[in-house]
Amino acid sequence: MRFRFLSCLWLAIFLSGLLLSCSETGKLYRSKNIEDREKAARLLFEKKDYEKAVFVFEELLSIYKGTGKAEDVLYYYAWCKYYLKDYLTAAFYFNDFANQFPNSKKAEQSQYMYGFCFYKDSDPWYLDQTSTKKAIENLQFYLKANPGSSRVDSCNLLMSELREKLAKKSFEQASLYLKIGYHKSAIESFRHMLEEYPDSRQKEEASFKQFIASVLYAEESVFEKQKKRYLEAISYYRKFVDKYPSSSFIQEAEEYYVKVNKAITRLEASNGITKSE
């Protein structure tokens, strides 16, 4: 009984304190006094009530502009936007902070957050990749400006993830060209993907599909250009098997390779008959 009584007592004290705290925050929030409003904004931020806090900080931005308090207000405002998942606006204000207060202790973190906000805004590979590219660009800028940062490994991991997303988009575009019969475009798109993203997880399949696209491109070419394009296909085959000798695509690649050699033999025989005629 005594334990239950003490537990209830402590709970009552805690709830009373919480209500009092909320009441005090509410008073400060409704106050027309600027210092009270500033305190309210900080308390709301600490309580993670970013929707209310952001309006007060936005009000304070114009009031404190050019004063010593502008630094903290802008910093908190950027974080409010971030926690509200308005990543592009947050990115703008983190960048604004880093530019306005380059000597601040928070400048380096703001530079990082500028790039990280674009990372958070980055869409899946099948949608627009503007934010993905901006994230890579600005994280690279951050690393260049802060080579000794404790965030180096984190930035590299983020950029690796972002590049893989771009590689996936490039791979799928090239695969679509292959699927719909645009074989020349497929060859070039796979080439671009492999050159631009050599560490992609899909580089092996891309190399294989590039070879397949080159075979199909040779098959549909006019007679005069077929042999040259079949020989080009063989060069893609050799690149593939040299780099991925244990690939799961090897058997299928070899079947196409045999097909290519037979086609070249027929072309040479046919060319010989044509010459003799």
Image (tube, grey):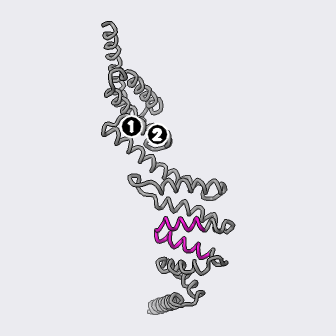
Considering the image in quadrants, where does the C terminus appear?
top left
* Residue 166 horizontal/vertical position (percent): 45, 49
Q: Which residue position is annotated with label 2?
A: 192
Residue 4 can be seen, yes or no: yes
Disc 1 marks a residue whose amino acid type is: Ser
Q: Secondary structure at mark 1?
A: helix
Q: Quadrant of residue 253?
A: top left
> Would you place residue 237 above or below residue 53 in this image?
above
**Is 57 a magenta residue?**
no
Q: Quadrant of residue 147?
A: bottom right
Q: Which residue position is annotated with label 1?
A: 185
- Is 186 or 149 nearer to us in this picture? 186
**Is 88 a magenta residue?**
yes
Residue that protrudes farthest toward the right in the picture: 103
> Would you place residue 215 above or below residue 178 in this image?
above
Q: Earlier in the sequence, mark 2 or mark 1?
A: 1
> Would you place residue 131 above or below residue 167 in this image?
below
> Which range of residues does the magenta coloring cover?
72-96
* Residue 112 horizontal/vertical position (percent): 58, 61
